[in-house]
Amino acid sequence: MVGEHAVYNGKIIMQSEAVVPVTLREVQSGFYVYESLRVIQAHPVHLEDHLLRLEASAKLINLTYPFNREEIASWVHALIEVDLVENASLRIQIYGGMQPQLFITTSEILTYPESFYTEGVKTFTYEGERLLPGAKNGNLLLNYIALEEARRQGCFEALLVDSEHKILEGTRSNFFAIKDGKLFTAQDEKVLLGITRDRVIKAAKQFGLQILYEAPSVEQVLAGSYDELFISATSMAAMPVSRVNGTIVGTTFALTREICSLVRQWELED
C-alpha cells in the first residue's frame, strides 16, 4: 500500500491529492525545505535527526511553520500505519508563505544493484556550488542540470566542483576519499550536513581513520592520489566510486564496504 495515502498539514489524504498550485509564489520560487528518509521494517530510520535538520534548513532560509517535531513524527507514524508500510522511501516537504503547507509522502524504497557496491560507480565532475549548501531546500536547478549531464555521460552521479577545483559533494550525496589511514571530506560549511554523512564519519573513526575536513582536488583524484573514493546518502549508505570523468580511480573498496555495512547495521538498531 506504499504511496496510497499522504499527509497534508496533519491530515491523512489520498496521495493523488497531495498537490500545490503552480500560481503560488512559494511554489514558483522553490521556497520549501524537505527531508528524505528510509522506512525499514515499519520504522522511520533516524527520524529525529531528519526532523532536526528540517528545522535547521528552514531557519537558514527564513521559512517558518507552525508544526513541531513531535507532531510531524506522529504524522509520519500515522502514515506508516494507515498504509501498512514495511519498507519505503519517505519524504517530508514544507512550503513556506502565509499558510505553510506540509506534505508527507511515501514511495517504493530506493535500492541499487549489488554490483554498484562490488564494482563501484562512474561519476562526472561539474563546476558549480549550491546556494546555501547547509539548507536542504527547493533550489535544485544546479543539482538537476549536473545530474542530467552526468547521466548523458553514462555516469551515476555528478560531483560538484568549486572555483578552486575542489570536489565538494555530489548532487544527491556527500563525497569522501581515503588515503593512508585518513578520511578526507569537504568542510562542514561548504556542504549539506548529511544524516548519513555523520554516520559515515562515526564509522570511519571506529575503523581507526583520521578525519580531515579537506576537499580533494579534481587533479589529485584523477592522478590516483587516493586509495578509495566513495559517496554517501540515505539511499546509498556508502557507495564506492570506480571512475571519475572516465578515469579509473579505484578497483578495490575494502574500507568503503566495511563503512557501508556498519552504517546499514545502525539503521536496523536505530
Image (tube, grey):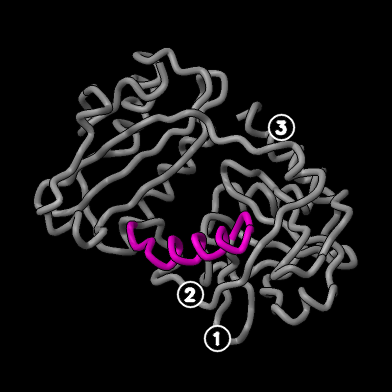
The numbered mark at residue 14 is: none
155 inside magenta stretch: yes
Horizontal relation, residue 64 to residue 255: left or right: left
Front of the two marks 1 and 3: 1
Residue holding disc 1? 163
Residue 265's disc number: 3
Provide the secondary structure element on which disc 3 rests: helix
Q: Give the range drawn in magenta.
A: 138-157
Residue 38, compared with residue 162, is above or below; it is: above
Residue 111: x and y in percent read: 61, 35
Q: Nearer the viewer, residue 203 or 91?
A: 91
Q: What element carries label 2?
A: loop
Q: Mark 2 points at which residue?
A: 129
Q: Which of 147 and 201 is in front in this view?
A: 147
Q: In this view, does 128 lie to the left or right of 99?
A: right
Percent coordinates x, y for residue 174 in the rendering: 60, 59
Q: Does the magenta stretch include residue 129?
A: no
Give the answer, above or below, for where 121 lies relative to 215.
above
Are discs 1 and 2 less than 8 Å apart at CB?
yes
**Residue 192 in sight:** no
Rendered-image quadrant of the C terminus? top right
